[in-house]
Image (cartoon, helix red, strand yellow):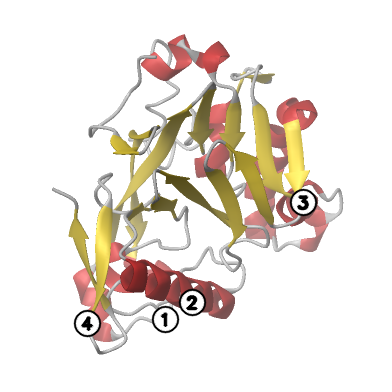
């Protein structure tokens, strides 16, 4: 199946994982609330984040991990929404997508699921944590959040409605078969999850937004991000994942890494890590 990608597929065993670039987002340095003055200078006045999704091809399945922004965030982030733009290779083959895994329900991950009030991937089962779906679709949430958060909640809820019949919920850790597992990784959102892919005795991980800024959070995993719903929990999740990735030398990628490439972590001995892209 043709795909939109910026790098070649990574093969592990019988599985191919293709990164799909949805563009990029320029984020103010102030979004990293507890960073030191020196750290802020490294990302000031804005830092450019990637926006990567993935296509996993395994057996009969074609599994999309996240769907990018679609058209919904272009007013603020004009260089987004590429993978589901009209005529893209992914959209041309949209009916072939069997499954979609959502790491979480922020608009830059689910916007590409919907256009003109309709699901763009009508044949796909959408896998999501129960706690994530319950949080964002709560009919009382709009009134519960501050005024500046109401528009984004309303957008997320409007995107959720057309895909509601496709949702398959799980409680935090699930085997989706054919070498694909999802694991709870809370903090960024209540039901954020990461994807573990295994085949032929090897493993790869997709971290979603457990990592946001490679520039800051590899060196200092305790750096908080403004859109984390529980920043301390997000930092603990990040440190746990980084320790596992480094100790077991597991290749991984993350949505907002500056590169769509997979890479490996090495502990630096000071609580931080060094990221080395795969050749």
Q: Residues within 10 Å of mark 3 (few under 14, many from 20)?
A: some
Left or right of 32? Residue 180 is: right
Residue on which disc 3 sits = 130
Query: Does residue 103 appear anywhere in the picture?
Result: no
Spatial distance from mark 2 to mark 3, Cα to Cα?
A: 22 Å
Q: Which mark is residue 222?
A: 1
Helix, strand or loop at label 1? It is loop
Residue 36, position as x, y percentages in the image: 30, 85
Instruction: Say whether marks 2 and 3 touch (CB < 8 Å).
Output: no
Helix, strand or loop at label 3? It is helix
The one nearer the camera, 25 or 200, is 200
Find numbered disc 2 in the image and state the secondary structure of the residue it sits on. helix
Q: Mark 3 or mark 4, which is nearer to you? A: 4
- Residue in view at x 62 percent, y 47 percent: 105
173 or 257: nearer the viewer: 173
Residue drawn where x is 76% and y is 44% of the image: 169
**Residue 18 visible in the displayed image:** yes
| Residue of label 2 | 235
Residue at x 34% of width, y 74% of height: 247
- Mark 2 and mark 1 lie on one chain; the one further toward the N terminus is 1
Q: Give the mark nearer the N terminus: 1 vs 4.
A: 1
C-alpha distance separating marks 3 and 4: 37 Å
């Amino acid at each position: 199946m043709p795909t939109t990608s910026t790098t070649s597929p990574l093969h592990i065993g019988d599985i191919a994982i293709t990164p799909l670039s949805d563009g990029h987002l320029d984020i103010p340095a102030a979004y990293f609330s507890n960073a030191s003055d020196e750290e802020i200078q490294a990302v000031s006045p804005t830092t450019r984040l990637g926006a990567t999704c993935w296509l996993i091809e395994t057996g009969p399945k074609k599994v999309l991990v996240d769907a990018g922004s679609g058209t919904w965030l272009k007013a603020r982030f004009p260089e987004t929404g590429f993978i589901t733009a009209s005529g893209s290779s992914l959209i041309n083959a949209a009916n072939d997508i069997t499954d979609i895994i959502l790491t979480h329900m922020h608009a830059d991950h689910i916007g590409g699921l919907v256009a003109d009030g309709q699901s763009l991937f009508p044949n796909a089962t959408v896998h999501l944590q129960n706690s994530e779906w319950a949080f964002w679709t709560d009919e009382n949430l709009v009134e519960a959040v501050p005024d500046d958060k109401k528009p984004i909640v309303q957008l997320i809820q409007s995107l959720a409605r057309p895909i509601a019949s496709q949702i398959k919920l799980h409680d935090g850790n699930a085997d989706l078969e054919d070498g694909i597992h999802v694991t709870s990784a809370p903090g960024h959102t209540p039901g954020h999850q990461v994807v573990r892919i295994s085949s032929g005795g090897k493993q790869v991980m997709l971290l979603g937004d457990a990592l946001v800024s490679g520039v800051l959070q590899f060196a200092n995993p305790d750096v908080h991000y403004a859109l984390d719903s529980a920043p301390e929990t997000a930092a603990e999740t990040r440190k746990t994942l980084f320790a596992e990735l480094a100790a077991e030398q597991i290749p991984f990628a993350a949505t907002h890494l500056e590169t769509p490439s997979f890479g490996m972590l090495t502990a630096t001995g000071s609580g931080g890590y060094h990221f080395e892209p795969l050749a």
